[in-house]
Amino acid sequence: MALLDILIYPDPRLREQAAPVTRVDDGVRRLVDDMLETMYEARGIGLAATQVGVAQRVVVIDVSEERDQPRVLINPEILEATGEASGEEGCLSIPGYYDDVARATRVRYQALDRNGEAYEESAEGTLAVCIQHEIDHLDGRLFIDYLSELKRKRVRKRMEKRERQLGAAS
Ligand code: ZN
């Protein structure tokens, strides 16, 4: 397994539309394993392939306290979304920034697992929010897109400043 570089906003690759996986082969499984390792290392609860520069519809999630319940969502699709609530979100591609976003509170979704087997699951709470957040990534959408233009500009400035500082330090 290998750690992957997580793209940081405003990297234009975060805006790419990811393509469906046509076959779950060893290459996809390696990507899944590397994404899981990268997500755990970064202490995130979810990671989309778009965030590591791979424009394929692959997502990994683990919302458990013990960090021992990895979920693999290949070609995920939301079948049904109900309820609405606002909650604080963050993103590994927008480090250090959190804000409130309104999402469905319950979703039913389908996806393929690491073996290419189709499954369906209902989710609520943090898992439901995470699934919506990660599927957005696959469509090139970020949680800050739901915020006001002014807030988005501030986030962009902050990330660009961060990049300059990191660049100067290395
Ligand atoms: Zn994210």
Image: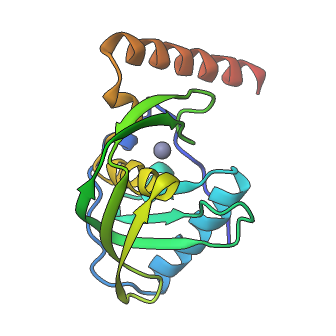
Residue 138 occupies which quadrant of the picture?
bottom left
Residue 3 occupies which quadrant of the picture?
bottom right
Farthest residue to the front: give it: 83
Q: In this view, does 89 lie to the left or right of 83?
A: right
Farthest residue to the left: give it: 79
| Residue at left offset 38%, top offset 84% | 24
For the N terminus, the quadrant is bottom right
| Residue at left offset 32%, top offset 42% | 84
| Residue at left offset 51%, top offset 65% | 60
For the C terminus, the quadrant is top right
Relative height, residue 109 to residue 23 (above, below): above
Q: Camera-side residue: 112 or 65? A: 65
Residue 146 occupies which quadrant of the picture?
top left
- Residue 12: image location, x then y, percent: 37, 36
Relative height, residue 19 to residue 94 (above, below): below
- Residue 4: image location, x then y, percent: 61, 57
Relative height, residue 63 to residue 16 (above, below): below
Q: Camera-side residue: 120 or 85? A: 85
- Residue 48: image location, x then y, percent: 45, 56
Q: Is residue 87 left or right of residue 152?
A: right
- Residue 41: image location, x then y, percent: 72, 56
Q: Camera-side residue: 14 or 136? A: 136
Residue 36 seen in the figure? yes
| Residue at left offset 37%, top offset 50% | 105
Q: How many marks?
A: 0
Q: How is the image coloured?
A: rainbow
Residue 142 seen in the figure? no
